[in-house]
Amino acid sequence: LVRMQFLQILSRKLGSLEMLFQIPFCQKQFPYTCLSTSARVYSKKKKGNSYEQVDQEKYKNLVHSVTSYKTSAQTPETILEEDNLLYGPPAKHRPPIKAGTKTPKNWVPLINPSKRILPVSSDSNVPMQIGLQRTKMPSVTRILQQTLSPQQVFYLERWKQKMIEEIGKEGFEEYTKNLFLQGELFHSALESIFLSEEMAARDQGEDDVVAGYLSSVEHVLEDISEVKALESGVHHKTLQYVGLVDCVAKYRGQLCVIDWKTSEKPKPFLQNTYDNPLQVAAYIGAINHDANYDFQVRCGLIVVAYKDGSPAHPHFMDPDLCSQYWNKWLLRLEEYMDKN
Ligand code: MN
C-alpha cells in the first residue's frame, strides 16, 4: 500500500513526465539522489551546477518525495511483480478519479426534462432491440478509448509489455482475442437467457468457459426483472453519440442500465472497474434523450462476472452516483470533440 501511494504521489508530481518511468527505475532515481546529496559539493565551483537553473521551489516536493522514500530494494523487477499483484494482468489499473473541479462547458442534464412518459408504459414483454444505425457519430467506447489519461495509457502499456514479456507477442494477441471472444459468447448467452431461447449449439470447449461466467452471475439474475431492452442501440440526440446497451431491466425493483463485464481478477469495488461507470452513465443519458425509448432510467448496474464461476460482483449506481459519473463523462466527451 505504501508503495502504491508512493507511485501515485510520484506519478502525480511527474505529471506528463510519467512516461519516463519506462526507463528502468534505478536509473531514473539516480539524478534525484545526486541532487540532494551532492549539491553542496558542487555549489562552490565557479561554473555552478546545472541544477541551480532548476526551479528549486517547484521540484522541492518531488525531490523530497523521491529521496525520502526507502528505495533500496526497488528494482524494476519488484515493481513489475508488485504491479502484477496490485493490478493483475486483466485488471488494468484505474487511477482514482480526481475531485471534480472542472465542469463541462456544455452541460446537458442526465435526465431529460422534456421527455413525456406515458402513464402506462408499453407493457410488452418483448425486450426492445433497436439496431445500431450506421453513422459517423462516435460511440461511447470509442470516445472513452480516445480520451484515456496519460496515466491510464501508461499503466495499460506497461501491463501489455509485461504480458508480452511473459507469453510473447503472438501469445498476447491470442490471449486478448480469447478474452474478447469469451466476452462475446457470455453476452450472447445472457441475451438468449433473457429472450428465453434455447442456447444455440456451440463448441463444447466454449460452452465450458461461458458456463463459468453464467454460474457466476446466477445470484444476480435472480434480482433482475422486467427486461425492457437487450443489446440495443442508443443515440443521444443532443450530444450526438451512440452506443450499444447490454440490458435495461429492473434490479431489485429499480430500473437500471446494466452492463455485463467479464473478468479473471476480482473487482470487488466500483473503483476497480476503470471507465465502466462513465460508460453506464453515458448510456443512461443517451436512453433518456432517445425517442425510441418511452421511459427514463436513473440508475446503473455493472455486473463483474468471473470465469471460475465465483459469485459475480454487482455494482449498483444510484441516481446521485450516476449524476457524478455523468459529469465526468461530459468532460471526456468534450475532450474528444475538441480533438476531433
Ligand atoms: Mn458488457
Image (spheres, helix red, strand yellow):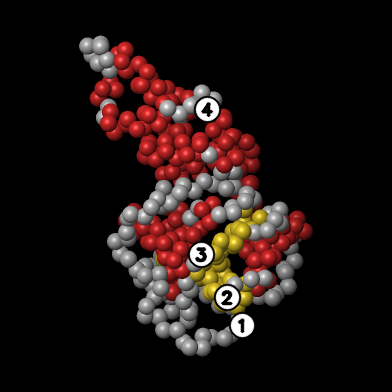
Decide if residue 230 is in sight here: no
In the image, which disc is placed on residue 253?
A: 2
Label 4 sits on residue:
74
Badge 3 marks a residue whose secondary structure is strand
Q: Position of residue 66 (x, y in %)?
A: 41, 29
Mark 1 crowdedness (10 Å alpha carbons): few <14, some 14-19, many ≥20: few
Three-letter amino acid code of the residue under disc 4: Gln
Q: For marks 1 and 4, give the one nearer the viewer.
A: 4
Residue at image x 51%, y 64%? 317
Looking at the picture, tell me which residue is in the foreground, 146 or 313: 313
Taking the image as shown, residue 270 lies to the left or right of residue 58, namely right
Residue 108 lies, with reference to residue 46, above or below; the image says: below
Q: What is the three-letter code of the residue carrying label 1? A: Asn
First-in-chain label (3 vs 4): 4
On the image, the x and y values in percent for residue 242 come to 45, 67
As measured in the structure, the alpha-carbon distance from the residue carrying label 3 to the one carrying label 4 is 39 Å
- Give residue 317's mark: 3
Q: Count neighbours of disc 3 (C-alpha within 10 A) and say few if under 14, some if 14 to 19, many if 20 or more.
A: many
- Whether pointer 4 and pointer 2 mark residues with C-beta atoms closer than 8 Å, the reply is no
Question: Element at badge 2?
Answer: loop
- Give amino acid for label 3: Met
